[in-house]
Amino acid sequence: MSQPISKFEYWTPRLLSLAFVAFLMLFSLDVITPEATLKEILIGLFMHNIPALILLGLTLVAWRHELVGAVVFVLAGLVYIGFTIYNGVPFPMNLTWSLTLAGPAFLIGFLYYRNWREKHHPVSR
């Protein structure tokens, strides 16, 4: 007989994904400058946050469907690594950038996958 997933295991990927989206949104604050008008700042914030808002929407879907979260966060990490390689970021720097942003995305994707696996293929303990 299998036991249900613990509350810690259930909530960890969900809370980490929200924190990750909030962390990504912090990078958009560079559009706030003294020379910019309010309209320019709001448009800049929106444009810079489009990927984070998409990820937030997919996080809300992943809240119920863990496999979506697993796929989305792993793909987000791979896309980021692809962008660093495509933009010609030198080797040591692209490795540290990838560990900083793609690493947490991979971790969150793995945690969502564990939630999904425990829910659909429980292992007896």
Image (cartoon, rainbow, N blue to C red):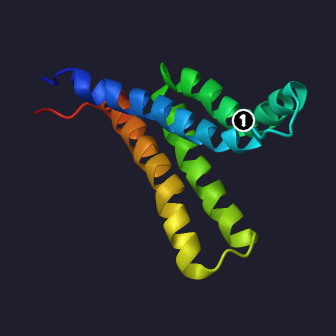
Q: Residue furthest bottom?
A: 91
Q: Residues within 10 Å of mark 1 (few under 14, many from 20)?
A: many
Quarter where residue 31 is shown: top right
- Could you say which is closer to the camera, residue 63 or residue 123? 63
Compared across the picture, whether 85 is left or right of 26 comes to: right
The x and y percentages for residue 97 are: 55, 64
Q: Residue at x 24, y 26 (%)?
A: 8
Quarter where residue 72 is shown: top right
- For the C terminus, give its image quadrant: top left
- Could you say which is closer to the camera, residue 75 or residue 120? 75
Quarter where residue 113 is shown: top left
Compared across the picture, whether 42 is left or right of 51 comes to: right
Residue 94 lies, with reference to residue 47, above or below; the image says: below
The amino acid on which the numbered mark 1 sits, given as a three-letter code, is Asn
- For the N terminus, give its image quadrant: top left
Residue 54 lies, with reference to residue 92, above or below; the image says: above
One can see residue 58 in this view: yes
The x and y percentages for residue 87 are: 75, 70
Residue 65 lies, with reference to residue 106, above or below; the image says: above
Q: Residue at x 41, y 35 (%)?
A: 112
Q: Residue at x 48, y 57 (%)?
A: 100
The x and y percentages for residue 22 are: 54, 33
Q: Residue at x 75, y 38 (%)?
A: 32
One can see residue 5 in this view: no
The x and y percentages for residue 13 are: 39, 33
Q: For numbered disc 1, what is the local secondary structure? A: helix
Residue where numbered disc 1 is placed? 49
Compared across the picture, whether 82 is left or right of 69 comes to: right
Q: Residue furthest front?
A: 34
Instruction: Please tell me how many numbered marks the rendered image carries.
Output: 1
